[in-house]
Amino acid sequence: MSILHSLAPSALSEETANPYPHLLAPLDLGGVTLRNRTVMGSMHTGLETLPDRFEQLAAFYAARAQGGVGLIVTGGVGVNAQALGAAGPDESLHAADLDGHRLVTRTIHDAGAKVLLQALHIGRYDHGGGVAPSAIRSPIGRAVPHELSGAQIEALIDDYARCATLAAQAGYDGVEVMGSEGYLINQFIAPRTNRRNDAWGGSFERRIRFALEIVRRIRRASDEHFMVMFRLSMLDLVEDGSTRQEVIALAQALEAAGVTLINTGIGWHEARVPTIATCVPRGAFAGFTRHVRDAVSVPVVAANRINTPAVAEAILARGDADLVSMARPLLADPDFVAKATAHRADEINTCIACNQACLDHTFSARRVSCLVNPFAAHERDLPLAAAARRARVAVVGAGPAGLACAVTAARRGYAVTLFEAAPRIGGQFNLACRIPGKEEFRETLRYFQRQLELTGVSVKLARRARADDLEDFDHVVLATGVVPRAPSFEGLDHPSVVSYAEAITGAKAIGQRVAIVGAGGIGFDVAELLTHPATAGDTITDYFAQWGVDASGATRGGLAAAHAATCADAPAREVWLLQRKPGAAGAGLAVTTGWIRRSVVKQRGLHSMTGVEYVRVDDNGLHLRVDGKARVLAVDHVVLCTGQESRRDLLAPLAARGIEPIVIGGADVAAEIDAKRAIDQGTRVALGLA
């Protein structure tokens, strides 16, 4: 067992047995017992296409099983060769691969967990068009799908049953039938995508027939202890989606067809409502699961933005669900359950729902990991080996890179001293925490603070390290971060010009008319902060109102009118978001969250200008040239969000003493503050110390 996974549930003492009585209670499913109510939700990791995929997947899932999770659901496995996209690799289940799958299932079972294989067909989300109940192109697709014939539908149902049969032979405890998120089965269910008038479409009963026939055929082909979990879209969040009454009726029909469990899906991939980003309140959608749970007798699983044991326990205690599904939180910390069981929840590396190393990687065909835990999906590549000797390591700078390096080196057994010029750890993360919707980032600083204590790192706060402080160390790591880059136009010394740090921290009061110079990630952060409604709440109700989620169940698809007062409620501030390069502002923001941020600034009525040439700042405001024409913005303040430069002032003094440090984080590469790269680099440098 690795250093990372030393919290096996079997090693826990009796007095720490039940800090979360609902979450940690076993669940008898009739011949199969889950050791607790935690489900590791399905995620496609990118490991599935590697040459040594089964060894990689076994290590990945073993870490979570050893960490105490009760039930694991694999990433989606195609029910046939074209199910995950005709242009991509064949990721369906083949008889020739059963021995590899048995390695995965045996490893999970040896660690005490159960495992389901997710049977998936993406339908019209295939970029080549794919197949669908009706020939209607997806808004995020590139081609019109082929409309399935009756014979092709029957063949697909057989494919699902064949996949389940092979899964049983491979040692899986069951399958999850993926029926949500706008994939093929969901496309049959919703009138939005099913315009057929035959036995597979038209009335509600015919639209759900495909889903029910799949479950019935799987059930007929399997034994009574083989689990069938159906992932049901509780809330489509698209026009012409299912009604609440239809969702409940389908759940009841699925129970009659023989499902063991019903899992929760929220929102289609084409929905324009955030469902899993950090701006979404914790546990926001559990109430929708409650409506289904009240109508069926099989156990129901809640999902989406459940990232702490306390949130999970509250959902179960209220009766919203029987189990909770967490995918990204178990990327962030594979020992989530074991730590919760041992009254060590303060040691959990909490998922901050940033999506930067998980979903952003998935949608750009890269290997998944986790911003706060670079070991995720790299269990075989990044072993945490003990140090051969207790060398002394100095880390200068307690931002994300320095924290990751210091903690990882200390875990390996090095004697680590961490120097930080500020009175607290965190670096640029302390700014991120202040942005509305990014409050979760505080969890990462809480985690690192606790890890510094547990690993015995000597922390020197409010101590700017000098070269002579570092002479007696075996290794010196510079993680000194960045300083804001000053643009090259006149008037930067004008009193109206402020840095992004001054604007975010409130070090300078910002007026009512503001120009933000730079429309990258930091520019959007400042824009969101300065226009955040003074009366805005942070409740689930407020979130639903802002994004137009109908919690009453009165509308098809669960959509309501977005809260029209978001602009009116904002501070009486007029803001211009300016960008030097042409093209849409924010085009370079993250794949899965950039659209959310662009939507927010649009909701709040910000002015956006691109292709801007900055001329000067004076008492009249910010002078610009746009399309060759002079313009003056009569603003109270100009906030500079024009990038950063690496802080490397220690390099020359260290070189004079013959010390060659390792430079990481922003001190290494300053381009657009990147916590994902910083934490990953800090971790890898610590692993490479000799």
Image (cartoon, grey):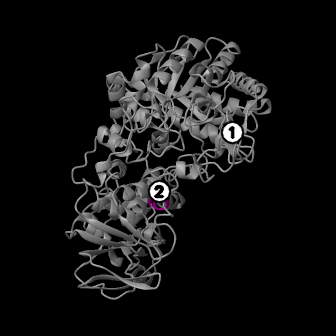
Residue 65 image position (x, y, % from top left) = 53, 32
- Mark 2 Cα shell of 10 Å, populated few (<14), some (14-19), many (≥20): some
Query: In the figure, is residue 175 to the left or right of 65?
Result: right
The residue depicted at 38 percent of the width and 45 percent of the height is 547
Instruction: Give the labeled residue for mark 1.
Output: 135
Question: Is 147 above or below relative to 371?
Answer: above
Residue 122 image position (x, y, % from top left) = 65, 38
Q: Which mark is residue 594?
A: 2
Q: Quick one: 208 or 466, which is closer to the camera? A: 208
Asked if the magenta segment contains residue 31, the reply would be no
Q: Quick one: 455 or 593, which is closer to the camera? A: 593
Query: In the figure, is residue 408 to the left or right of 53?
Result: left
Q: Quick one: 387 or 617, which is closer to the camera? A: 617
Asked if the magenta segment contains residue 678, the reply would be yes
Point out the residue furthest to the left here. Answer: 509
Q: Amino acid at mark 2?
A: Gly
Q: Which residues are magenta?
A: 675-679
Q: Secondary structure under badge 1? A: loop
Would residue 459 be seen by someone viewing this image from the given angle?
yes
> Are the residues tagged 1 and 2 within 8 Å (C-beta)?
no
- Magenta segment's dominant SS is helix
Of tags 1 and 2, the one toward the viewer is 1
Question: Is 645 above or below relative to 146?
Answer: below
Q: Which is more N-terminal, label 2 or label 1? A: 1
